[in-house]
Image (cartoon, grey):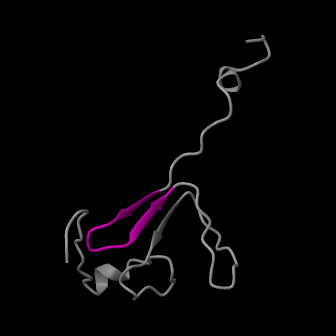
């Protein structure tokens, strides 16, 4: 490694972090990581590294969660591996 080369450069290109979607009990979908969210016309929403997407259908700011699930007492507690 040269004196001007940093340790991260010597290790090679950075691997992008995986995107993780978490189903919040009685709440939204939490999306963490690099993701582009677009509408049906292909227009990109301005997003951050973590977004919460509405599952209850009552948000005034769809597709994003605005906390309406609390007011409407939305109930959903799916678990991975469960069958319906």
Residue 47 in the image: state x and y as whole percent: 60, 66
Helix, strand or loop: magenta stretch: strand
User: Looking at the picture, how far across and down is residue 59, in whole percent?
Assistant: 44, 85
Residue shown at the point (63%, 75%) measured from the top left: 38
Q: Nearer the viewer, residue 63 or 40?
A: 40
Total number of numbered labels?
0
Q: Is residue 53 left or right of residue 84?
A: right
Q: Looking at the image, is 51 positioned above or below residue 39?
A: above
Identify which residue is drawn at 71% across, 20% down: 6
Q: Position of residue 76 (x, y in %)?
A: 24, 77
- Asked if 82 appears above or below 74 in the picture, the reply is above
Image-based side of 26 in relation to 41, left or right: left
Q: Assess whether residue 30 is covered by the magenta stretch.
A: yes
Image height check: is 69 above or below 34? below
Is residue 24 inside the magenta stretch? Answer: yes
Q: Is residue 38 above or below residue 18?
A: below
Residue 29 found in image quarter: bottom left
Q: Which quadrant would residue 48 be assigned to in this image?
A: bottom right
Specify start and end residues of the magenta stretch as a single range.
20-32
Which quarter shows the N terminus?
top right
Residue at point 64% right, 74% down? Answer: 45
Q: Nearer the viewer, residue 84 or 57?
A: 84
The residue at the point 42 percent across, 78 percent down is 54
Figure quadrant of residue 39 = bottom right
72 horizontally vs 54: left or right? left
Give the left or right position of residue 73, taking residue 65 as reference. left
Q: State the image coordinates of residue 72 (x, y, percent, origin top left).
A: 29, 87
Quadrant into which the C terminus falls: bottom left
- Residue at the left extreme of this rendering: 83
């Amino acid at each position: 490694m040269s004196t001007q080369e940093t340790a991260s450069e010597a290790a090679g290109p950075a691997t992008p972090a995986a995107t993780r979607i978490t189903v919040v009990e009685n709440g939204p979908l939490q999306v963490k990581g690099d993701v582009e969210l677009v509408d049906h016309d292909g227009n990109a929403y301005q997003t951050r590294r973590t977004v919460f997407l509405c599952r209850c259908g009552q948000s005034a700011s769809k597709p994003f969660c605005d906390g309406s699930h609390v007011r409407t007492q939305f109930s959903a507690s799916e678990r991975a591996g469960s069958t319906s």
